[in-house]
Image: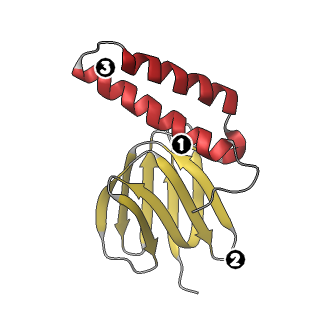
Amino acid sequence: MNTFSLKVIACNKVFYDGRCAQVVLPLHDGLKAIQAHHENMVFAVEVGEIRILEENGNTIYGVTGTGFAQIINNRATVIVDTCESPEEIDVRRAQEAKERAEEQLRQKQSIEEYHRSKASLARAMARLKAGSKDKPIGY
Protein backbone atom coordinates (compact mmCIF):
# COMPACT_ATOMS: atom_id res chain seq x y z
CA MET A 1 0.00 0.00 0.00
CA ASN A 2 1.35 3.42 -0.95
CA THR A 3 1.52 5.75 2.05
CA PHE A 4 2.60 9.28 2.82
CA SER A 5 3.46 11.33 5.88
CA LEU A 6 0.57 13.30 7.42
CA LYS A 7 0.55 15.77 10.27
CA VAL A 8 -2.72 17.39 11.41
CA ILE A 9 -2.07 20.28 13.79
CA ALA A 10 -4.71 22.21 15.75
CA CYS A 11 -4.06 25.24 17.95
CA ASN A 12 -4.05 23.17 21.14
CA LYS A 13 -2.64 19.79 20.00
CA VAL A 14 -1.32 17.56 17.27
CA PHE A 15 -4.38 15.56 16.17
CA TYR A 16 -2.43 13.11 13.98
CA ASP A 17 1.22 12.52 13.14
CA GLY A 18 2.16 9.45 11.14
CA ARG A 19 1.87 7.62 7.86
CA CYS A 20 -1.43 7.08 6.12
CA ALA A 21 -2.88 5.83 2.85
CA GLN A 22 -5.46 8.62 2.43
CA VAL A 23 -6.86 11.71 4.08
CA VAL A 24 -10.21 13.27 3.15
CA LEU A 25 -10.56 16.98 3.94
CA PRO A 26 -13.51 19.40 3.77
CA LEU A 27 -13.00 22.22 1.27
CA HIS A 28 -15.22 25.09 0.18
CA ASP A 29 -16.47 23.13 -2.82
CA GLY A 30 -16.71 19.67 -1.24
CA LEU A 31 -14.45 16.92 0.03
CA LYS A 32 -10.90 16.35 -1.27
CA ALA A 33 -9.12 13.01 -0.95
CA ILE A 34 -5.33 13.07 -0.80
CA GLN A 35 -3.34 9.91 -1.49
CA ALA A 36 0.33 9.05 -1.81
CA HIS A 37 2.31 10.94 -4.48
CA HIS A 38 -0.34 13.65 -4.83
CA GLU A 39 0.84 16.72 -6.72
CA ASN A 40 2.29 19.56 -4.64
CA MET A 41 -0.37 22.10 -3.67
CA VAL A 42 -1.81 24.32 -0.93
CA PHE A 43 -5.53 24.78 -0.30
CA ALA A 44 -7.96 26.14 2.31
CA VAL A 45 -9.64 23.71 4.69
CA GLU A 46 -13.19 24.46 5.85
CA VAL A 47 -15.18 23.42 8.91
CA GLY A 48 -16.24 19.82 8.51
CA GLU A 49 -15.32 16.18 8.85
CA ILE A 50 -11.83 14.77 8.34
CA ARG A 51 -11.18 11.10 7.65
CA ILE A 52 -7.72 9.51 7.84
CA LEU A 53 -7.11 6.01 6.50
CA GLU A 54 -4.02 4.67 8.27
CA GLU A 55 -1.62 2.25 6.60
CA ASN A 56 -2.99 -0.60 8.79
CA GLY A 57 -6.53 -0.03 7.43
CA ASN A 58 -7.83 1.72 10.55
CA THR A 59 -9.87 4.89 9.91
CA ILE A 60 -9.65 7.92 12.20
CA TYR A 61 -12.49 10.44 12.12
CA GLY A 62 -12.59 14.02 13.35
CA VAL A 63 -14.12 17.47 13.01
CA THR A 64 -11.87 20.29 11.81
CA GLY A 65 -12.11 24.02 11.99
CA THR A 66 -10.80 26.32 9.27
CA GLY A 67 -7.19 26.35 8.17
CA PHE A 68 -5.07 25.16 5.29
CA ALA A 69 -3.33 22.06 3.96
CA GLN A 70 -0.03 21.78 2.14
CA ILE A 71 1.20 18.79 0.16
CA ILE A 72 4.89 18.75 -0.79
CA ASN A 73 7.09 15.77 -1.67
CA ASN A 74 4.69 13.08 -0.40
CA ARG A 75 4.20 14.93 2.91
CA ALA A 76 0.92 16.55 3.90
CA THR A 77 0.58 19.11 6.67
CA VAL A 78 -2.85 20.30 7.78
CA ILE A 79 -3.01 23.30 10.11
CA VAL A 80 -6.47 24.13 11.48
CA ASP A 81 -7.80 26.15 14.39
CA THR A 82 -9.54 23.10 15.93
CA CYS A 83 -9.62 19.37 15.35
CA GLU A 84 -11.59 17.02 17.59
CA SER A 85 -12.41 13.34 17.57
CA PRO A 86 -16.12 12.45 18.03
CA GLU A 87 -15.40 11.23 21.58
CA GLU A 88 -14.09 14.68 22.57
CA ILE A 89 -17.25 16.52 21.52
CA ASP A 90 -19.66 17.65 24.23
CA VAL A 91 -23.01 17.39 22.42
CA ARG A 92 -24.82 19.57 25.00
CA ARG A 93 -22.28 22.39 24.57
CA ALA A 94 -22.46 22.05 20.77
CA GLN A 95 -26.26 22.30 20.91
CA GLU A 96 -26.03 25.42 23.08
CA ALA A 97 -23.49 26.96 20.68
CA LYS A 98 -25.80 26.21 17.75
CA GLU A 99 -28.72 27.90 19.49
CA ARG A 100 -26.59 30.96 20.35
CA ALA A 101 -25.36 31.27 16.76
CA GLU A 102 -28.89 30.94 15.36
CA GLU A 103 -30.11 33.65 17.74
CA GLN A 104 -27.22 35.94 16.75
CA LEU A 105 -28.09 35.43 13.07
CA ARG A 106 -31.65 36.58 13.78
CA GLN A 107 -30.32 39.87 15.20
CA LYS A 108 -29.29 42.85 13.11
CA GLN A 109 -25.52 42.63 12.77
CA SER A 110 -22.63 44.15 10.91
CA ILE A 111 -21.22 42.14 8.03
CA GLU A 112 -18.28 41.06 10.21
CA GLU A 113 -20.58 39.90 13.02
CA TYR A 114 -22.77 38.08 10.50
CA HIS A 115 -19.81 36.11 9.12
CA ARG A 116 -18.59 35.33 12.64
CA SER A 117 -22.06 34.03 13.57
CA LYS A 118 -22.22 31.92 10.38
CA ALA A 119 -18.82 30.39 11.23
CA SER A 120 -19.97 29.63 14.79
CA LEU A 121 -23.08 27.94 13.44
CA ALA A 122 -21.03 25.84 10.98
CA ARG A 123 -18.69 24.67 13.77
CA ALA A 124 -21.60 23.78 16.04
CA MET A 125 -23.40 21.87 13.28
CA ALA A 126 -20.26 19.87 12.41
CA ARG A 127 -19.72 19.01 16.08
CA LEU A 128 -23.34 17.96 16.51
CA LYS A 129 -23.19 15.78 13.42
CA ALA A 130 -20.07 13.99 14.64
CA GLY A 131 -20.76 13.97 18.37
CA SER A 132 -24.32 12.72 18.26
CA LYS A 133 -23.44 9.44 16.57
CA ASP A 134 -22.60 6.29 18.49
CA LYS A 135 -20.62 4.99 15.53
CA PRO A 136 -17.92 6.73 13.47
CA ILE A 137 -18.86 9.53 11.10
CA GLY A 138 -20.42 8.20 7.92
CA TYR A 139 -19.80 9.40 4.40
Residue 123 horizontal side relative to residue 67, left or right? right
Q: Earlier in the sequence, mark 2 or mark 3?
A: 2
Image point (62%, 56%), residue name? 61
Residue highlighted by disc 2:
56
- Residue 100 lies, with reference to residue 89, above or below; the image says above
- Residue 68 lies, with reference to residue 76, above or below; the image says above
| Amino acid type indicated by mark 2 | Asn
Image point (46%, 31%), residue name? 121
Q: Earlier in the sequence, mark 3 or mark 1?
A: 3
Image point (30%, 60%), residue name? 42
For the image, the number of numbered tags is: 3
Q: Secondary structure at mark 1?
A: helix
Q: Earlier in the sequence, mark 2 or mark 1?
A: 2
Circle 2 Cα neighbour tier, 10 Å, few/some/many (<14 / 14–19 / ≥20): few
- Taking the view exactly as shown, the residue that stands out farthest to the top is 108
Q: Secondary structure at mark 3?
A: helix
Q: Position of residue 46 (x, y in %)?
A: 39, 48
Q: Nearer the viewer, residue 65 or 113?
A: 113
Marks 3 and 1, Cα distance to the nearest angstrom? 20 Å
Residue highlighted by disc 1:
126
- Mark 2 or mark 3, whichever is nearer to me: 3
